[in-house]
Amino acid sequence: EADIYQTPRYLVIGTGKKITLECSQTMGHDKMYWYQQDPGMELHLIHYSYGVNSTEKGDLSSESTVSRIRTEHFPLTLESARPSHTSQYLCASNFLGARGDTQYFGPGTRLTVL
Amino acid sequence: AQKITQTQPGMFVQEKEAVTLDCTYDTSDPSYGLFWYKQPSSGEMIFLIYQGSYDQQNATEGRYSLNFQKARKSANLVISASQLGDSAMYFCAMRENRGSTLGRLYFGRGTQLTVWP
């Protein structure tokens, strides 16, 4: 299984601020993902990475950007936060085991943009 | 087209009773995996159970079992002996094992389960 860490857990910030949501895992997993989820709603894939220097956009268009300079670290950045970015952001990585790729999630970051 | 469909926005069950949460899927990939996750109000996603498309038997994990009907493309989650702590949102997800996005999951819209005493 995977231990996936996300910081901060909660963030309240004003419009126009630049923010970075941190995600890290210590298991050396290559595949990592970011999802956006509004309360009580489905998950939308916004970014994914298959390894260092590999990043792709997901299904949902997002103004955020990601980087993957190190295997264990997959941060998400919003250059200028807006109220429409208020949501929960979930990071995940894949553990390759007997079930094939199984996705495990971090605890999430709940972002509120005022 | 939706790859995962969960038709029950909300379900209610009395404590100690069994409940079935429905999930149907759509794929042309002969090799795939099906997952169920639980999301309590705290927000984290907790992996519950997995079924591979070539698995002959239905998966079971404690009180959770997956009723896999391949011809009908359904993968229903059965929770036996419901507990108050089972109250949460439940998501069905699928992984297709071929294609350019190996490992990514497609999620349904979720079912909110409420267990009452």
Image: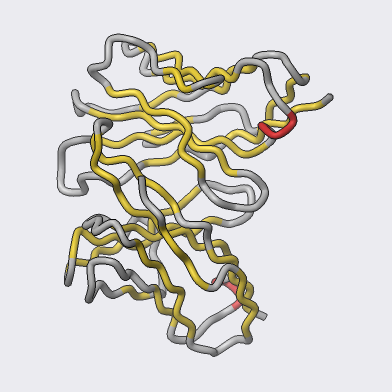
Residue at the outermost right position: B117
Residue B18 point in image, percent of width and height: 65, 14
- Asked whether, in this view, residue A66 is left or right of residue A53, the answer is right
Q: Quadrant of residue A12?
A: bottom right
- Asked whether, in this view, residue A18 is left or right of residue A60, the answer is right
Q: Is residue B45 above or below residue A58?
A: above
Residue A46 point in image, percent of width and height: 38, 61
Q: Report the residue at 44% width, 51% height from top.
A: A105
For the C terminus of chain B, give its image quadrant.
top right
Looking at the picture, the colour scheme in use is: secondary structure
Q: Report the residue at 73% width, 16% height from top.
A: B16
For the N terminus of chain B, give its image quadrant.
top left
- Asked whether, in this view, residue B103 is left or right of residue B37, the answer is left
Residue A61 point in image, percent of width and height: 38, 64
Q: Report the residue at 38% width, 26% height from top.
A: B25
Q: Is residue A79 above or below residue A5?
A: below
Q: Is residue B37 above or below residue A110?
A: above
Frontmost residue, B3 versus A33? A33
Residue B109 point in image, percent of width and height: 53, 40
- Asked whether, in this view, residue A38 is left or right of residue B50, the answer is right
Q: Quadrant of residue A48?
A: bottom left
Q: Report the residue at 48% width, 18% height from top.
A: B65
